[in-house]
Amino acid sequence: EPIARRIGARMLLCLVGLPPAAHVGGTQAITLNPIDGWAGVSGTAAEQPTAMGAGLVLRVPSALNSFKGPTATARYELVSLADTFGPALAEVFHASGSFRTALIGCARDVKVLFKIGTSLADSASDHDEEGCRGRLGDVLRQHVGDRAPTADEFVSSISSLCGDHWGGFTSFESKRPPPGALEWHQDWAAADLQYAFGACRTVMLAFPAAGASGHDVHEGEGILTELVQLSHEFSTESLKARNSYRGLSTGEQDRKAASDLGVTEEHIVRPRYCRGQEILVYKDAEHLHRSPRATSDPAGRARQAIWRFQ
């Protein structure tokens, strides 16, 4: 049975509970439903804490009502690597730095196969699909063995977590975050709003640096993307089109948008990476996100790379 067909029944969702309803200035602490369309799953939740920080839901200020959409319906989720790809792959992923490095080297192959399986497919640019399957499949078999998923199963397993696709696949392989990644932002442009306010989800698969032993991966903060959960769907790109944002750099615009929204420390969620919660899933329209600040410190970099699927 293909792995992708087993995801709905086997996925381990480590839901993060929110505080009881309360208001603190512009802060609204509310309970949100699981992401739309996800079936209930049996299994044992990962040990607490699943995240650090209060993570209070940020109520969009009334002055910015023209930039918001419907009330948010979903909270971020942490998904098990083992339930997504199988326990054999998860075990090797945690134990073998050479496997993680080899997998990162297949980023182009993953990108092509991911695109082929979505509405983004373009036959003119995807002619190398068989070569991509071969390279990715070889890495999986060489490191995981007979229980390894095929290349197609690997990509479809992660792809199925995304819902509707609109943004494609990106691999950030440098330990230094890309420009602007350390500021609170969203991923779409204003022209993409018809997708952003739909069912699409962002899926982040992180590749942690080796732990103290040199084999087991580092666990804790500074690996997965940091989030701010919003009370409503929102478009920061539309907000940044206002006259007051003109002439500012992208980073300055992002900082001003976060300030106008009222982001404070109490809103920040820092998901904790560990066994059983290696994959981060969230709706981009209902969150702000940024690279963990630890990755910008050469002495405290906690991840080797991160893959983003949308």
Image (cartoon, rainbow, N blue to C red):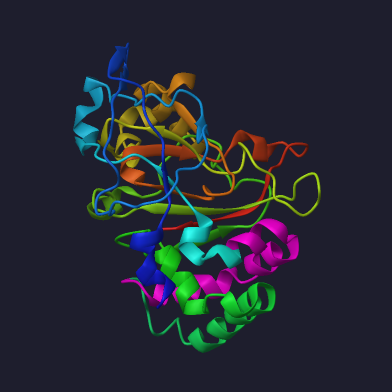
Image quarter (top left, top right, bottom left or bottom right) of the C terminus: bottom left
Identity of the residue drawn at 40% across and 65% down: 159
In the figure, is residue 202 to the left or right of 297?
A: left
Extreme-right residue of the structure: 213
Is residue 82 visible in this depiction of the protein?
yes
Q: Quadrant of residue 3?
A: bottom left
Q: Main secondary structure of the magenta part?
A: helix
Is residue 167 visible in this depiction of the protein?
no
Please say whether residue 91 is one of the residues in the magenta stretch. Answer: yes
Identity of the residue drawn at 44% across and 54% down: 203
Identity of the residue drawn at 80% across and 52% down: 214
Which residue is more in the foreground, 279 or 283? 279
Identity of the residue drawn at 69% across and 66% down: 99
Please say whether residue 34 is one of the residues in the magenta stretch. Answer: no
Q: Is residue 56 above or below residue 46?
A: above
| Residue 115 drawn at (x, y percent) | 41, 72
In the figure, is residue 47 to the left or right of 102?
A: left
Q: Quadrant of residue 224?
A: top right
The stretch in magenta equals 90-119
Which residue is more in the foreground, 179 or 249? 179
Image quarter (top left, top right, bottom left or bottom right) of the N terminus: bottom left
Q: Is residue 252 above or below residue 109?
A: above
| Residue 245 drawn at (x, y percent) | 38, 31
| Residue 220 drawn at (x, y percent) | 62, 38
In the figure, is residue 128 to the left or right of 6?
A: right
Q: Quadrant of residue 95?
A: bottom right
